[in-house]
Amino acid sequence: MTEQDPKAAAEAPKEAAAPAEKPARHGPPIVIAEEVLNERGEQTAAQLASTLGTLVLDSAGREDNPWVRVDAKELHAAAKKCRDGEMGMDMLNLMLAVDWVDRIQMIYVLYSTTNNRKVILKADLPAESPAIDSLTDLWEAATWYERETHDLFGVDFPGNSDMSPLLLYEGFEGHPGLKSYPLNDYEEW
Amino acid sequence: MTTEPQFETVDMMLNMGPQHPATHGVFRMVLKVDGEKVIDVIPHIGYLHRGTERLAEVETYGQVITLFDRVDYIANLNNELAFVRAGEQIMEVEAPERAQYIRVILAELNRVASHLLFIGTYAIDLGAMTPVMYGFRERERIQNLFEHVTGARMMHNYMRIGGVKADVPDDFVPWVRQLIGEVRKGVEECDKLLSTNEVFLGRTRGVGVIDGPTAISCGLSGPSLRGSGVPYDVRKDDPYEIYPYLNYKVPVGENGDCWDRYYLRMLECYESLSMIEQCLDQFPEGPIMAAGRRIARPPAGEVFSHSENPRGDLGVYLVSDGTDKPYRVKIRPPSFCNLVGLATMTRGSYIADAVAILGSLDIVLGEVDR
């Protein structure tokens, strides 16, 4: 055995592990939208930034809907600050999960009925066993949204006492909201 | 005289639905009752889950409009409007003025049709068989107009991202004017028949009360929220289309009981009819479709847009990855959120009132389950 052999052996699996080239996409190139806030949105964004302070990881927005991305562990704290602070976000308007395959993004749309302003909170969860703190203690509306997201995306919400299936039936296997779930060829009920 | 129980009582679970005429579709609730009193309500939904949101990810933007027709099948045009507005925001196009007027006229007519259906079926829930005949008679007139304009009575597929499919027929304006006169008379008839009826008042006044802050926390919207005295209406608070140019009031209730929720819908019928008249007075000529490519291929990004559905705040969160199919479509279904408040409203009332309370929320199960 020469000295070069182990070197070559170490390099060989490295090459094999390199990801395969994605086949070229047909159709026109992808354009990425510019995110521009209007005047009202800038005001809300400034207010939101001062409310959340160092919790903000990333922020942008479109029209009058600014969004901020926070750490998944800090989401409950951030939401509580938005609700109780001067922002007065008393309504959880919408909550959804987006399956980006490598991660699951939780999006919360908060609305203030007194100030008539909307903000969007985002948090990234790992694709493997995603979990995020429940917001049921802040807004009652979160109860059903969280059960729905648990059904369709398999996200766990520690703090929500009732995680029984809401949209799916008892004993359904899999999470049909995920991109990996087949759209056909599944077992009919 | 106090009514202290003389003996031990046992709580009983009473199943109601999913095959029950008073649940307006396949909705099931399990009532925990102590005699006639409801202690707790456990709603069960999902019998009509069709996976609309997941299905929308494999359809092109034009095809998704047909799915939205089927989400809330009582107010199809309002739902189409919600999706095409989200599509327009992400594509950064604006529908021409005439198209916006056509959309608003049709959406408001559909709101009246939806409320008429609610008034009729709500009266049936409470034991009055007549109003539904009046309600359906007027709703039928509106659907005849829809058939004339869009070609279909219910599943219209009429609106497009950037405008509408086709211009309205030549006799549209006189037809709608005549229709408004007839429908207004019909609404007045229902109003006279029900709103001051002693039995109806007895069944709805002070029943199913929910206060404003709780209603907001539960995420209620539309007449269900405004009944509790919160003046939240997307048409006023986040104006879209031509609503800023119309003169109208948003009726707001005080007590948050079933009667308030019912009567607000009655008042909204009058407001909508007057809005349509204003639209007809201002109805402009011009193109009905924005210039641009016929295939929607928006840039990658995301947008949240919402509009006022007869049942409340209908939101659409659209995520695009730059292809001709949406990456994720999330619907904020107003009926789904209104149902969250059902347990709070029903606790402590009688079993017969549970029917009245559920009816007053005006749910559409197609939208609750999607």
Image (cartoon, coloured by chain):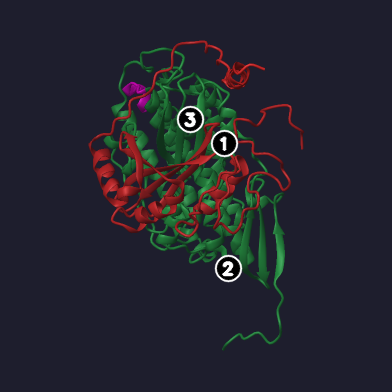
Chain colours: A red, B green
Q: Considering only vertical position in the picture, is B265 above or below A15?
A: below
Tell which subunit mark 3 falls on: B
Point out the tag, 1 or 3, that comes first from the N-terminus. 1
Q: What is the secondary structure assignment of the residue under circle 1?
A: loop
Three-letter code for the amino acid on which mark 2 is drawn: Ser
Q: Are the two marked residues, 3 and 2, in contact with CB atoms closer than 8 angstroms?
A: no
**Same chain for marks 1 and 3?**
yes
Give the left or right position of residue B9, taking residue B117 as reference.
right
Q: Which residue is mark 2?
A: B349
Point out residue A131 in the picture as x, y percentages from the top left corner: 55, 47
Point out residue B160 in the picture as x, y percentages from the top left corner: 45, 22
Around disc 2, counting alpha carbons within 10 Å, would you say few (fewer than 14), some (14 to 19), or many (20 or more)? some
What distance separates the C-alpha of mark 1 from that of mark 3? Answer: 11 Å
Three-letter code for the amino acid on which mark 1 is drawn: Tyr
Three-letter code for the amino acid on which mark 3 is drawn: Glu
Query: In this orientation, which residue lies closer to the viewer: B258 or A19?
Result: A19
Q: Are the two marked residues, 1 and 3, in contact with CB atoms closer than 8 angstroms?
A: no
Around disc 3, counting alpha carbons within 10 Å, would you say few (fewer than 14), some (14 to 19), or many (20 or more)? many
What distance separates the C-alpha of mark 3 from that of mark 2? Answer: 37 Å
Q: Which residue is mark 3?
A: B80
Q: Which residue is mark 1?
A: B73
Report the magenta residues as a range.
Answer: B92-101
Q: Are the two marked residues, 1 and 2, in contact with CB atoms closer than 8 angstroms?
A: no
Q: What is the secondary structure assignment of the residue under circle 3?
A: helix
Tell which subunit mark 1 falls on: B
Question: Which residue is found at the position 53% from the left and 66% from the top?
Answer: B202
Query: In this orientation, which residue lies closer to the viewer: A87 or B354?
Result: A87
- Whether residue B102 is visible to the viewer of this picture, yes or no, is no
